[in-house]
Image (cartoon, helix red, strand yellow):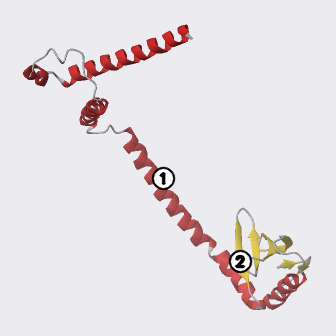
Amino acid sequence: MEVGGTVFYEKKEAGAALLAVCQSMKQADAMINVGQYQGFSIRLKFDSWNKEFILSLKNENVYRVSLGSDENGNIIRINNALEAIPQKLAEAERKLETVQGQLKNAMGEVKKTFPKEEELNEKLERLSELNALLNMDEKETLMEGEEEQDEPEKEKRSIHDKISAYKKSTQLENTEDRIGISSEICIG
């Protein structure tokens, strides 16, 4: 392990050098380069939130290790982190395989048609008819020609006829409102 330009071959000496760097740090939460270990660059920072030193081993990825106060213990922690890399890689590959399978299934589901689409459209059409009928009740408007019809004929009218009559009466009301506004403008 290289720490601060000096190469160490004994765990205890390397661990002591790391602790010396930790004690000499003057700035919290700032990452400093420390040296090299087994092809990884070593960087160190003090995490002021958790009140601990974090050693980062960086190559293609970054692996973090929390340091303690024991010289040998820190080297063991670093070695454990490096030895866990193949297990983490295998776990990541399993997760990737699972996600790819889920993506494939989702893509298949998206391409499928909704089996009850026709029924859904019928229900939506019926819902809009019922909403229109409810709106007619709220407005309490008389439809054109209702006074002339006797009761049995009113009941025989289809929902479509009732909606059409409602639309005509609404259009007539809107036209009358516009005419009233126009005449006020002309008079004014």
Looking at numbered disc 2 in the image, what kind of residue is underneath it? Val
Q: Which part of the image, by quadrant, shows the C terminus?
A: top right
Looking at numbered disc 1 in the image, what kind of residue is underneath it? Gln
Is disc 1 placed on a helix, strand or loop? helix
Task: In the rendered structure, find residue 65 and report the number of the disc placed on it.
Answer: 2
Query: Label 1, on which residue?
Result: 100
Task: In the rendered structure, find residue 187 and report the number of the disc placed on it.
Answer: none
Q: Where is residue 53 in the image (x, y as percent from the top left)?
A: 77, 80
Q: Where is residue 143 in the image (x, y as percent from the top left)?
A: 24, 20
Determine the image quadrant of residue 124: top left
Q: Which residue is drawn at 40% across and 14% down?
A: 176
Q: With 86 as the anchor, is 50 left or right in this view? A: right
Is disc 2 placed on a helix, strand or loop? strand
Q: With 170 as the anchor, is 58 left or right in this view? A: right
Q: Which residue is drawn at 35% across and 15% down?
A: 172
Q: Which part of the image, by quadrant, shows the N terminus?
A: bottom right
Among all residues in the image, which is located at the extreme left? 152
Q: Where is residue 180 in the image (x, y as percent from the top left)?
A: 45, 14
Seen in the picture, residue 7 relative to 178 is either above or below; the reply is below
